[in-house]
């Protein structure tokens, strides 16, 4: 039985690896021929599979002056189109390298797996479908190595295996034969993260030149995202909706060449604008002539193309009051609203809910009975703020009067006599005014916020009292001063609020 030498064993290993790579290459070629609808690379075909042979040249501690002889291997790569400038890829290679000098020698197998970024001159400087396409690339990843080394001192290192980082950079040229097939040649400078492949762990890390020659296959048919029959690479309008007729550039048909395609053009035979859905607009107001009630006078979209000089929302041709001040509410005829119909528009009417006159700013004048009621007073017992029953009929009548004049404000004024401190009398007068207000509210006064209370303490007596006289002699005058009085007026008129 013959004895296999170390070199024969290594040769068989290399033969096995090449057989595997060849099988993969045949399988990919079969897939390419059997199907045209797999993936894609280039702007149309974005995925590219490469099968290549490699020639590796070692340079390290054994021959540091120059790169060694070519040693063969192979690889496979998958590249993905990113842009006209860049491709990304995953590359797996396997090969061998060896060197000998004096008594130093090694024989190694190396496998790498790297992610690569390619800078293309084609698709950027040159056309993407140019026959010759130069490129630069860099890659980084990991390397696996198995080495047998013998040193000059006779020491051996057998079946030494290790994993390490690896990186490479280089340049190449792609030769495009068709949309599906291309060839390439490239040279890369590769360095690994350890200095052990040659058995020496001194000096610089081991480095290599890797020369690759192979074929690339672009898989799939040209991309046509919108399905209009024009490939994306030539399609100037790649997002055309399904079913829309397009020209040879892939853009929708535009019969009147107004920039609005026929499928969106409401007037496909008359040039118009995008704002008017392709229809003409003589006055350029954004309303198509076919919809414009005033086609020769620029107006507003909201008013179907008619102008509105005073901005009240009523077109000038229907506005009976074309000079209404800005911000004033108007009716359908363009005139200011007048809720009570007194001829004084609401925006000038102090009492918009009660008919009045222009002289009174839209407010009604108080009738004689109301004037008499307002002149009445509610009297209080000494040191009391309670509303006596005797005055409730008067207050009920005031409630009725307030209903007649819903826009008027009632000022309720509380007063006290001079007995007690000023602070006490002030508080007492305020309490009297508040109690009267509470009674009016309890009787159903509308809009109770128009009831305003003030307390004046002892500061505003109706009659002067001689404080030097005994209290029994001044009781009548003091009782007159213990009161609540009223003022009824419109909000702008001079209520005594002090």
Image (cartoon, grey):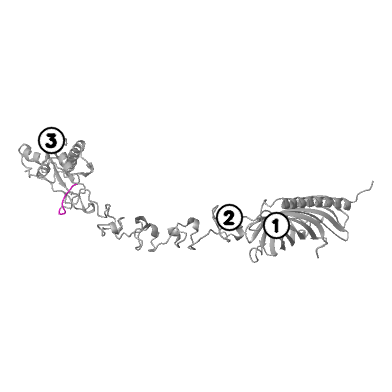
Tell me which numbered mark, 3 or 2, is placed earlier along the sequence. Answer: 2
The disc label shown at residue 473, or none: none
Tell me which numbered mark, 3 or 1, is placed earlier along the sequence. Answer: 1
In the displayed structure, does residue 442 sit left or right of residue 233?
A: left
Secondary element under disc 1, as helix, strand or loop, is loop
Q: Which secondary structure dominates the residues rendered in magenta? A: loop
Q: Where is residue 116 in the image (x, y as percent from the top left)?
A: 69, 57
Q: Where is residue 133 in the image (x, y as percent from the top left)?
A: 69, 64
Mark 1 crowdedness (10 Å alpha carbons): few <14, some 14-19, many ≥20: some
Mark 3 crowdedness (10 Å alpha carbons): few <14, some 14-19, many ≥20: few
Residue position marked by numbered label 3 in the rendering = 393
Numbered circles on residues, count: 3
Q: In which quarter of the image is residue 394?
A: top left
Q: Where is residue 89 in the image (x, y as percent from the top left)?
A: 68, 55
Taking the view exactly as shown, the residue that stands out farthest to the bottom is 125
Q: How far apart are marks 3 and 1 (CA)?
A: 106 Å
Secondary element under disc 2, as helix, strand or loop, is loop
Residue position marked by numbered label 1 in the rendering = 180
């Amino acid at each position: 039985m013959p004895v296999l030498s170390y070199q024969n064993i290594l040769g068989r290993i290399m033969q096995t690896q090449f057989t595997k790579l060849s099988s993969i290459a045949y399988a990919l070629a079969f897939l390419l021929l059997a199907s045209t609808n797999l993936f894609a690379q280039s702007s149309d075909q974005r995925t590219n599979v490469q099968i290549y042979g490699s020639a590796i040249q070692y340079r390290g501690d054994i021959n540091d002056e120059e790169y060694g002889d070519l040693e063969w291997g192979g690889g496979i790569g998958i590249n993905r189109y990113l842009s006209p400038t860049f491709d990304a890829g995953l590359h797996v290679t396997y090969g061998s390298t060896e060197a000998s000098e004096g008594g130093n020698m090694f024989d190694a197998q190396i496998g790498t797996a790297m992610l690569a970024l390619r800078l293309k001159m084609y698709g950027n400087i040159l056309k993407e479908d140019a026959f010759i396409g130069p490129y630069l690339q860099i890659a980084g990843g990991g390397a696996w190595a198995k080495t047998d080394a013998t040193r000059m001192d006779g020491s051996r290192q057998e079946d030494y295996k290790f994993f390490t980082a690896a990186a490479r950079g280089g340049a190449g040229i792609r030769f495009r034969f068709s949309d599906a097939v291309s060839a390439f040649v490239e040279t890369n400078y590769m360095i690994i993260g350890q200095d052990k492949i040659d058995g020496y762990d001194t000096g610089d890390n081991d480095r290599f030149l890797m020369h690759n020659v192979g074929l690339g296959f672009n898989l799939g048919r040209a991309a046509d995202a919108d399905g209009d029959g024009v490939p994306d690479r030539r399609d100037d309008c790649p997002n055309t909706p399904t079913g829309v007729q397009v020209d040879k550039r892939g853009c929708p048909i535009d019969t009147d060449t107004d920039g609005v395609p026929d499928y969106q053009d409401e007037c496909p035979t008359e040039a118009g604008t995008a704002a008017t859905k392709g229809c003409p607009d003589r006055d350029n107001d954004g309303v198509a002539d076919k919809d414009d009630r005033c086609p020769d006078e620029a107006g507003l979209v909201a008013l179907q193309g008619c102008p509105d000089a005073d901005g009240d929302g009523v077109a000038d041709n229907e506005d009976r009051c074309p000079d209404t001040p800005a911000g004033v509410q108007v009716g359908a005829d363009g005139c200011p609203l007048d809720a009570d119909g007194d001829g004084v528009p609401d925006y000038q009417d102090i009492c918009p809910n009660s008919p009045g006159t222009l002289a009174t700013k839209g407010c009604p004048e108080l009738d004689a009975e109301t004037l008499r009621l307002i002149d009445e007073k509610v009297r209080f017992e000494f040191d009391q703020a309670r509303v006596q029953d005797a005055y409730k009929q008067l207050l009920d009548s005031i409630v009725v009067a307030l209903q007649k004049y819903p826009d008027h404000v009632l000022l309720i004024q509380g007063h006290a006599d001079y007995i007690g401190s000023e602070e006490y009398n002030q508080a007492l007068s305020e309490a009297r005014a508040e109690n009267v207000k509470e009674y009016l509210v309890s009787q159903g006064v509308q809009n109770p916020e128009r009831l305003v209370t003030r307390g004046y303490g002892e500061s505003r007596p109706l009659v002067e009292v001689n404080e030097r006289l005994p209290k029994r002699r001044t009781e009548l005058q003091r009782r007159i001063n213990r009161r609540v009085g009223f003022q009824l007026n419109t909000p702008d008129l001079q209520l005594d609020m002090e």
